[in-house]
Amino acid sequence: MKIALLGSTGMLGSKMAEILKAKGHELLAPSHSQVDLNRPYTIENYFKDQTFDVLVNCAGFTRVDACEEPAKFSMVLNVNGTSAGWLAKYCKRTHRILVHFSTDYVFNGQKEEPYLETDKPDPLNTYGKTKWQGEKLLRAEDPFYYLIRTSWVFGPKGDNFVSRMADLLMTKPRIEVVDDQVGGPTYSGDLAQFTMELLEKKAKPGLYHFSNAGSVSWFEFAQEIQKQTGYVSCEIAPVSSENVFRPAQRPANSQFDLSKATGAVGHAFRVWQEALGDYLMKDFNNEPA
Ligand SMILES: NC(=O)c1ccc[n+]([C@@H]2O[C@H](COP(=O)([O-])OP(=O)(O)OC[C@H]3O[C@@H](n4cnc5c(N)ncnc54)[C@H](OP(=O)(O)O)[C@@H]3O)[C@@H](O)[C@H]2O)c1
């Protein structure tokens, strides 16, 4: 397949590029300035002379707290929301498959069980609201699409919880981490593999939830990072999210039910602890400081 990839410099996009090249697919990877999701005309301008089969959109504005800044709102809405509609319209008209990513933050976190694809979104923050808007616009255009919601992503080339924790554990005597938000960590490499499997197996199009198997609180996640990195001199203290000010509210529960994703590719996914070990061994030590 020839795959056009947006966001190839980011955490998910860089793994996607690595994996699809390793699988022998051809890659077309326009830069942010060549296809800018805040400027719709750049989509048609760039792609009109290109041939490709699938458009994978890993671009997004992912700094969740920064999304709350009023001055950024129209850009955030375009990049995370409106542009999903533009891409869907373009893919439908030109008969390309569209792969787009969304987030666990479309949910309000009040459900006690893992979230199903059929559960109703009710986002708590601007990031979640704009991503939900993007989902609705994409589905209204109805191209052949895979819309994949994911959560708590870690991997190389990104500002993520694992690399931030590892830095803090190395340098601080004590840190506090919230223990009342539960979710499913996702290794970018496993998400990229899952995405390629959907495409290669010609799975049924539609909405899928994907994370690694198992769920955890941020506090327990930090404890596991400490165990696996061996940075044991730092004390990790649990704290309630009420005592930590953040501009964007987060859901208390954002675990995903993975049955639909499992069924689509015909196998279960590995647990997040194993994926974390793989990331720390393969990718983390090779990242530039
Ligand atoms: N990270 C998570 O925990 C998480 C959780 C759930 C869902 N997701 C979703 O997964 C997808 C990938 O996230 P990620 O964490 O890999 O993101 P990331 O590391 O922040 O990378 C974002 C990518 O988007 C590009 N980009 C930003 N603004 C753009 C614009 N206006 N036009 C074109 N490209 C633009 C960036 O390019 P430059 O660097 O050149 O600006 C970068 O390549 C997103 O849809 C995100 O919402 C992520």
Image: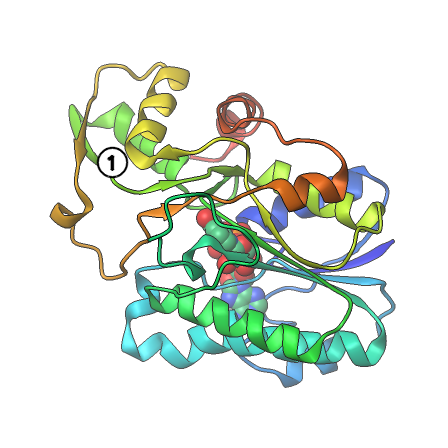
Residue 36 makes an appearance in the image: no
Q: How is the image coloured?
A: rainbow
Up the image or down, 27 lies above or below 228; here it is below
Image quadrant in which you'd find residue 34: bottom right
- For the C terminus, which image quadrant? top left
Residue designated by label 1: 179
Image quadrant in which you'd find residue 62: bottom left
Image quadrant in which you'd find residue 5: bottom right
Percent x, y of residue 249: 27, 58
Is 288 in front, or is 225? 225
Percent x, y of residue 75: 44, 77
Image-based side of 227 in relation to 98, left or right: left
Q: What residue type is labelled 1?
A: Asp
Up the image or down, 214 lies above or below 63; here it is above
Up the image or down, 57 lies above or below 152; here it is below
Of helix, strand and loop, which one carries label 1? loop
Percent x, y of residue 270: 60, 27
Image-based side of 250 in relation to 149, left or right: left
Image-based side of 105 in relation to 250, left or right: right
Up the image or down, 173 lies above or below 66; here it is above
For the view shown, which residue lies furthest in the left direction? 243
Residue 125 makes an appearance in the image: yes
Crowding near the residue tagged with mark 1, few <14, some 14–19, many ≥20 C-alpha atoms within 10 Å: some
Image-based side of 93 in relation to 68, left or right: right
At x 74%, y 79%, the residue is 90
